Image (spheres, helix red, strand yellow):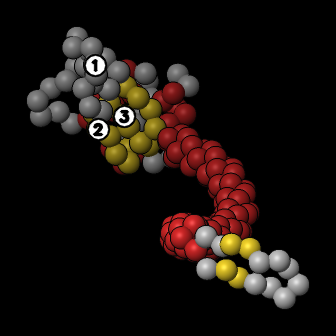
Amino acid sequence: MLLRSTDAPATKVDVKNINGKLDKMSKTLVENSSTLSQLIEEMREIRKSQQFLSDQYEEMKKHLHSTDEEVKTLRIKNQDLKGHVRKLEAESGQMQEDINNLEQNGRRECLEFQVLTCEESENTDQLVIGVSKLLQVDLSAKDISVSHRLSSASESNRQPTIIAWFCSRRIRDAVFNI
């Protein structure tokens, strides 16, 4: 087949060659189109992943900000509680000292009597009165508020101590100061 142009001289065209090239180009276009479609799909997936990661990042930023605020609040609360604990510890120490002083004051009317033989049905008031007579102190049962033996001593050869509360400090001092 011959193609003619009005201005150019007639040239012989090889249709088979052109058709072959067109087929080859068509196949290449189809292959490239398929590859291009795959690339476009992969880009869509990448964009979805990127958007998902961006959303997750924003969510984590919000969570981190919220956590930071909570930590600040807890730090302030912790400092307040530490101050409160220090105050309570100081008050507790003062109360312990006050209790100790009260206990000491409460024990001012009592004396311990040691190394008195323990008998089965003893009267500890009478034992204290007997010791007082030996010390030449006139003492009667009405001068003793209460007396009893303490739990047995750790040393097996010692007798348990008798503790006696006197009705007044004056009576206690009379026995003690001998």
Q: Nearer the viewer, mark 1 or mark 2?
A: 1
Q: Nearer the viewer, residue 52 or 133?
A: 52
Q: Cβ–Cβ below 8 Å for labels 1 and 3?
A: no
Q: Cβ–Cβ below 8 Å for labels 1 and 2?
A: no
* Looking at the image, residue 76 lies above or below residue 109: below
Side of 84 where 154 appears, left or right: left
Residue 118 badge: none
The N terminus lies in which quarter of the figure? bottom right
* Looking at the image, residue 90 lies above or below residue 121: below
Q: Amino acid at mark 3?
A: Ile
The answer to whether residue 86 is seen in the rendering is yes
Residue in the picture at 12% in, 34% down: 121
Which residue is outermost to the bottom? 6
Residue in the picture at 80% in, 85% down: 5
N-terminal of the pair, mark 3 or mark 2, is: 2
Tag 1 secondary structure: loop
Q: CA distance from mark 3 to mark 2?
A: 6 Å
Q: Cβ–Cβ below 8 Å for labels 3 and 2?
A: yes
The answer to whether residue 80 is seen in the rendering is no
Q: What residue is disc 3 on?
A: 163
Crowd band around label 1 with a 10 angstrom C-alpha radius: few (<14), some (14–19), many (20+): few
Q: Where in the figure is residue 12, as x and y percent of width and height? A: 68, 72
Which residue is outermost to the right? 7
Side of 36 where 120 appears, left or right: left
Q: Where in the figure is residue 164, as x and y percent of width and height? A: 38, 37
Q: What residue is disc 1 on?
A: 154
Q: Where in the figure is residue 140, as x and y percent of width and height? A: 36, 41
Asked where in the image residue 16 lies, by quadrant, the reply is bottom right
Q: Nearer the viewer, residue 57 or 50?
A: 50
Q: What residue is disc 2 on?
A: 148
Tag 3 secondary structure: strand
Q: Nearer the viewer, mark 1 or mark 3?
A: 1
